[in-house]
């Protein structure tokens, strides 16, 4: 039963989802359907009102005419009975037949007559009853009203099994020497019913035609309004693809033409700005690339001289020995900066080369943590690694992903202020993710938005001991984008910062749901999975005091 219900639900849900998807994406569909619903509702209300008014008018007019006619004929019949001198049963019977013939001539084919004796009639002269309409048309309630002396009682009735409408009007009739009788006039409303049916058909045809006309007008209006919008969307999409020469066609002098001209002016302005910025960007990239390459040759010479001085520092006086160490350290930072500049130049030029292989992200993270521990031993910053069960493999370029993780770890150590660092690795159906969380100085929301900008630092005056060119996080985000992944940051002043790297496992991308949260409290990392022991113990590599 459950499976059958689920199947029925899926059968109903599928078309509804498709309709909703199309409804949300098509302004023309929304406009036409809304116009159709409003138009049908308005026509239905108007049609019901007109039908009711016409029906009531026809019935009221017909009933008024029937009452006037029946009152006249009833009075004429009673006057004929009163003026007659018939005494015998035969004469009275002939008198009644003559009266009925006269009444039928006056009423025509649309009226029938029913003559019934009053139940309280005690006359010895018994006349035959007469019915030119079914006697069943006269209800007991109707007879009771006539017998009680009601003034011209009347009632709606059905004259046939097909539901032919009719009206019965009753009146008492006193026949001389024959006692009291009841005379009923039965009128058919078939003509009025036909008139009402014809009116309803005409109204229905007019309603369909009107709704069709309204929908057609709505479609044409929507088409005229949506066509320029669609054209603008196509041109905007092509502009976004880099086809800066695309323009909207301009026809006429109406509002849409004004929109097209304004859009084209905006596109021309954007083209000029983009062309100018591209020229400046090319000059900037070429300058950075040329300077970086030109610096490599003198830097190599300086490095050779520095290595000689550094190796012989023990033979120098203390101040000269210290200068040799500072020179060597600063050359390391200079080489790192130069390498970052060259990497940025390759990324900007689109010359970055990636070699994808199935790699376990957990292994990469673990190796990078164990590699950085000796360098941060004197800081006393513990790094805790948490991994979800199972494998964490994805298609990636290992050197670049290693560089991303290395940058995140270095940034966390730099700002941890001696507090622990939690690193979590989680694998999902579509992607894998690593979160690096520190509990140090943290970032403001404005700083979190700019942390990936080139050469930007949260505190330019902060002393940095692990390099810090201002390009590491920028390069890390570019590497993540090259993998169709995401690198995001969060921070809170005094509560630390968190960075999340997400990489897709397949070509389907990361999907809508993140693999793991960006912000996690310290106690929540234990819910990710087990803590992974590291082969490098920070206590064993710590430098003696």
Image (cartoon, grey):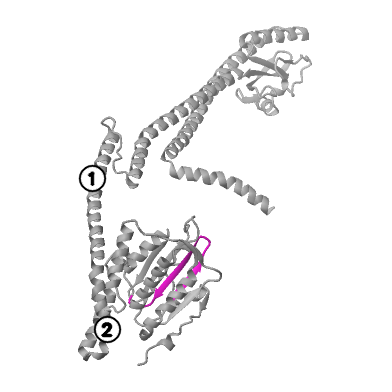
- Magenta residue check for 424: yes
Residue 436 placement (x, y as % from top left): 41, 72
At x 51% / y 60%, what residue is drawn?
A: 430
Residue receiving disc 1: 269
Q: First in sequence: mark 2 or mark 1?
A: 1
At x 39% / y 72%, what residue is drawn?
A: 406
Please tell me whether mark 1 sits on a helix, a strand or a loop.
helix
At x 32% / y 46%, what residue is drawn?
A: 242
Residue 428 placement (x, y as % from top left): 52, 64
Q: Distance between the residues labelled 2 and 1?
A: 57 Å
Q: In this view, does 218 lie above or below 73?
A: below
Residue 255 placement (x, y as % from top left): 28, 35
Question: Residue 297 occupies which quadrant of the picture?
Answer: bottom left
Q: Which mark is residue 310?
A: 2
Q: Nearer the viewer, mark 2 or mark 1?
A: 2
Q: Quadrant of the C terminus?
A: bottom left
Question: Residue 355 occupies which quadrant of the picture?
Answer: bottom left
Question: Which stretch is magenta?
Answer: 422-441
Viewer-side residue, 517 vs 347? 347
- Magenta residue check for 56: no
Q: In this view, does 457 lie above or below 81?
A: below
Please tell me whether mark 2 sits on a helix, a strand or a loop.
helix
Question: What is the total number of numbered labels drawn onto the structure image?
Answer: 2
Q: Is the magenta stretch mostly helix, strand or loop?
A: strand
Q: Residue 500 carries which label?
A: none
Residue 275 placement (x, y as % from top left): 24, 48
Mark 2 nearby-residue class (10 Å; few <14, some 14–19, many ≥20): many
Q: In this view, does 135 lie above or below 509?
A: above
Question: Residue 62 occupies which quadrant of the picture?
Answer: top right
């Amino acid at each position: 039963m459950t499976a059958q219900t689920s199947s029925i639900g899926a059968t109903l849900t599928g078309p509804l989802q498709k309709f909703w998807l199309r409804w949300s994406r098509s302004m023309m569909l929304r406009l036409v359907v809304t116009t159709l619903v409003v138009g049908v509702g308005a026509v239905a209300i108007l049609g019901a009102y007109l039908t009711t008014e016409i029906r009531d008018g026809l019935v009221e007019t017909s009933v008024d005419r029937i009452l006037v006619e029946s009152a006249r004929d009833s009075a004429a019949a009673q006057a004929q009975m009163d003026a007659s001198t018939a005494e015998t049963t035969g004469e009275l019977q002939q008198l009644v037949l003559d009266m009925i013939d006269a009444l039928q001539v006056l009423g025509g084919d649309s009226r029938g007559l029913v003559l019934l004796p009053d139940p309280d009639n005690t006359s010895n002269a018994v006349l035959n009853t007469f019915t030119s309409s079914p006697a069943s048309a006269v209800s007991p309630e109707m007879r009771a009203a006539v017998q009680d002396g009601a003034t011209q009682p009347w009632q709606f009735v059905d004259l046939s099994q097909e539901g032919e409408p009719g009206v019965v009007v009753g009146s008492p009739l006193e026949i001389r020497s024959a006692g009291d009788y009841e005379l009923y006039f039965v009128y058919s409303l078939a003509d009025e019913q036909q008139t009402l049916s014809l009116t309803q058909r005409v109204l229905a045809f007019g309603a369909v035609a009107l709704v069709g006309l309204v929908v057609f007008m709505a479609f044409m209006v929507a088409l005229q309004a949506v066509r320029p919008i669609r054209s603008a969307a196509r041109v905007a999409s092509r502009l976004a693809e880099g086809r800066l020469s695309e323009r909207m066609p301009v026809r006429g002098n109406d509002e849409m033409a004004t929109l097209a001209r304004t859009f084209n002016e905006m596109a021309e302005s954007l083209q000029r700005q983009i062309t100018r910025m591209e020229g400046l960007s090319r000059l900037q990239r070429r300058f950075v690339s040329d300077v970086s390459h030109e610096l490599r040759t003198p830097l190599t010479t300086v490095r050779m001289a520095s290595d000689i001085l550094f190796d012989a520092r023990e033979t120098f006086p203390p101040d000269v020995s210290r200068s040799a160490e500072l020179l060597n350290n600063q050359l390391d930072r200079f080489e790192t900066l130069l390498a970052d500049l060259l990497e940025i130049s390759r990324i900007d030029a689109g010359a970055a080369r990636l070699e994808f292989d199935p790699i376990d992200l957990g292994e990469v993270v673990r190796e990078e943590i164990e590699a950085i521990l000796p360098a941060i031993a004197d800081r006393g910053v513990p790094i805790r690694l948490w991994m979800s069960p199972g494998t964490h493999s994805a298609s990636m370029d290992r050197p670049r992903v290693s560089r991303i993780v290395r940058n995140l770890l270095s940034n966390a150590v730099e700002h941890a202020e001696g507090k622990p660092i939690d690193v979590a690795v989680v694998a999902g159906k579509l992607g894998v993710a690593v979160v690096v969380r520190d509990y140090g100085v943290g970032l403001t929301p404005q700083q979190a938005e700019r942390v990936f900008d080139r050469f930007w630092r949260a505190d330019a005056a902060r002393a940095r001991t692990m390099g810090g060119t201002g390009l590491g996080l920028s390069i890390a985000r570019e590497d993540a984008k090259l993998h169709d992944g995401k690198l995001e940051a969060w921070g809170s002043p005094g509560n630390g910062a968190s960075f999340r790297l997400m990489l897709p496992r397949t070509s389907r991308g990361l999907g809508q749901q993140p693999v793991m949260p960006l912000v996690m409290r310290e106690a929540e990392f234990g819910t990710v999975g087990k803590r992974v022991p590291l082969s490098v113990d920070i206590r064993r590599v710590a430098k003696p005091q």
